[in-house]
Image (cartoon, rainbow, N blue to C red):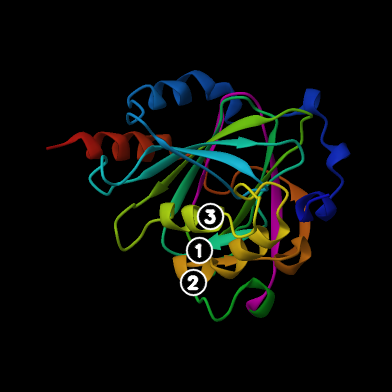
Amino acid sequence: MSSLEAGFEVGAVLEQDLQSDYAEDAAENAAAFALIEDDPDPQVVNGEPEGASIRFVKTGETTRGRYLMAKVEIPPGSGPPLHVHTRTDEWFYAPDGGVVMLMGTRTYTDMDNPPDVSGRDTIRMIPMKKGAMVFGRRNHIHGFLNISDKTVMMWLVWTPDTPEVTLKDYFESIARPILPGVRGARNNPIVQLKAVSEARDYGMMFSTDFWQYAEKVEEGEAPFGKNLDGLIRLFESAKQA
């Protein structure tokens, strides 16, 4: 059982009851991603969460430093620990559905005063139906969990992606095999510890336990919407000469 599963009763959120204010916009969400094409020969690594396959389909090298995009396989019951990005904003797109987003509303900007020091947050559960998307601002707690019984896809977009500010190096680092005979991070708790310990180098605060950052959990809407216009502008800006 992951720390996210331990944080709340997953069974209370049934697949057939999933609701999302953004699920009705699945067609326009898909249309936004149709504006771009995957880079040829994308790099694939195994890493966080829990051995998920991460395919980097766009990088700062081909987006003029505007964004990094990955298509991630999320095994059943998997999801990253609650964490905070201080250098990047992020979009979460669930083409398969089956995911619950976990998002806070408090702002955390000081790496030396993470949520367990400066004050934990109320975490909202946002069930995502097929085609749903939400936006996550930097300096806010977030995570997600695959509550289905099958592997699902999540498409993640981080902005910016420059040599000074990139998460690709982070995923490559934590995915590097560090035990003989171990491929990537699958079933390797040491790599999970590595993911947490190296997060600070990339401007992130990672929890090691759900309740370390969460004060309570409630159902609710995504606090920052889905920012579709912002995503489209980002995609278009990366194409400009």
Given this view, does label 1 or label 3 mark the residue nearer the observer?
A: 3
Crowding near the residue tagged with mark 1, few <14, some 14–19, many ≥20 C-alpha atoms within 10 Å = many
- Dot 2 amino acid type: Thr
At numbered mark 1, what does the secondary structure look like: helix, strand or loop? Answer: loop
CB atoms of marks 2 and 3 within 8 Å: no
- Dot 3 amino acid type: Arg
Q: Nearer the viewer, residue 154 or 193?
A: 193
Give above or below for 19 relative to 146.
Answer: above
Q: Does the stretch in magenta take in 125?
A: yes
Marks 2 and 3, how far apart at CA: 29 Å
CB atoms of marks 2 and 1 within 8 Å: yes
Give above or below for 165 relative to 187.
Answer: below
Which stretch is magenta? 118-137
User: Residue placed farthest to the top in the image?
Assistant: 27
Marks 1 and 3, how far apart at CA: 27 Å
Q: Name the N-terminal-most of marks 2 and 3.
A: 2
Residue 133 placement, left or right of 210:
left
Q: Which residue is mark 2?
A: 109
- Dot 1 amino acid type: Asn
Give above or below for 32 relative to 79.
Answer: above
The structure residue drawn at horizontal position 83% and vertical position 49%, both measured from the top left corner, is 1
The structure residue drawn at horizontal position 43% and vertical position 55%, both measured from the top left corner, is 167
